[in-house]
Amino acid sequence: MTELATPVAAWQPSDLELSRRALRRRATTKSVLVALISSVVVAVVLVVVVVNTPGWEVVRQTFFDPQVALDSFWPILQGLGVNIVVLLVGAVGVAIFATLLAILRSLRGPVFFPLRFLATAYTDLFRGVPLILVLYLVGFGVPALQLFPRVPAVVWGTIAIIISYSAYVAEVLRAGMEAVHPSQRIAARSLGLTHGQTLRIVVIPQGVRKVVPALMNDFVSMQKDVGLISVLGVVDAVRAAQLQVAETFNYTPYVVAGIFFIILSWPMIRLTDTFTARLNKREQAGGIV
């Protein structure tokens, strides 16, 4: 006759642990209240100082006119749609081209030296040239060669952004790939994987995971820089704001455009911070800090 197993009591935190949790909750609540009160005080002080400056009334009429903001809202919003399309297309192009550059720079062996040299020269060149100069060179210089049929300026602007940002993202990806321990490559090759399969299945996924916060920051930076395509005459949010300023002789449309770009960038900024904090927490789990 088998004996019945005695039920195991579920774990319960001790009184000491419960008191520690209550103390942490009280400390967190106190910190939040102090931060909230201090933020409100600083905001009120700043508002009082700015409003009481001698030139505030002129600034308010020039930069914060509600009627001008309302009139320019829809044209700038339509221009923002162009920025979003350029951003999405550019992000895909950068992801593909930068990955190719990172792979070329990671090739080993003297036979691949010309490819490594070209990839290195490319990243060094376009990391040193300001984006606005790349826009001028691509947007005005390439069409002047008359090698291609007439192409909209927004296309050249997107290509310029891809060319410039691929150099930055390629270096981030290469750093992530080099951070993967060499034993991972050796183990993959010992299993019969080719060099390409090792990169695609083992190295690149682990490398990207290590540099996701940096890649997300590059994406946030690109969200702002897509506004520079206005220098090519593209009617995006920035150019639409310029046209509204030329009509009203008021700078409020620039403020409206800036608010739109903040709204566009804010979700990715918060997502980047959240993902970075989660990644740090996972890496420090179980460790003693």
Image (cartoon, helix red, strand yellow):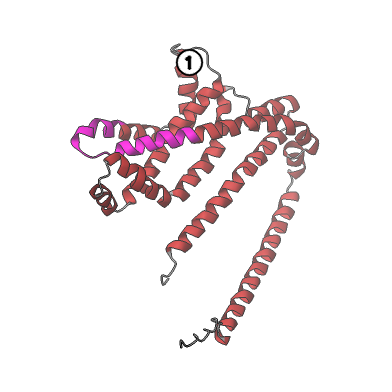
Query: In this rendering, does residue 175 appear at all?
Result: no
210 or 184, which lies in front? 184
Count of picture labels? 1
Q: Position of residue 13 (x, y in %)?
A: 55, 82
Describe residue 190's horizontal placement relative to residue 265 as left or right: left
Residues in magenta? 92-118
Above or below residue 51? Residue 153 is above
Instruction: Classify residue 9 by image quadrant.
Output: bottom right
Q: Which residue is mark 1?
A: 143
In magenta segment, residue 108: yes
Above or below residue 129? Residue 169 is below
Describe residue 186's horizontal placement relative to residue 30 as left or right: left
Secondary structure of the residue carrying tag 1 is: helix
Q: Position of residue 239 (x, y in %)?
A: 63, 27
256 or 38, which lies in front? 256
118 or 203, which lies in front? 203
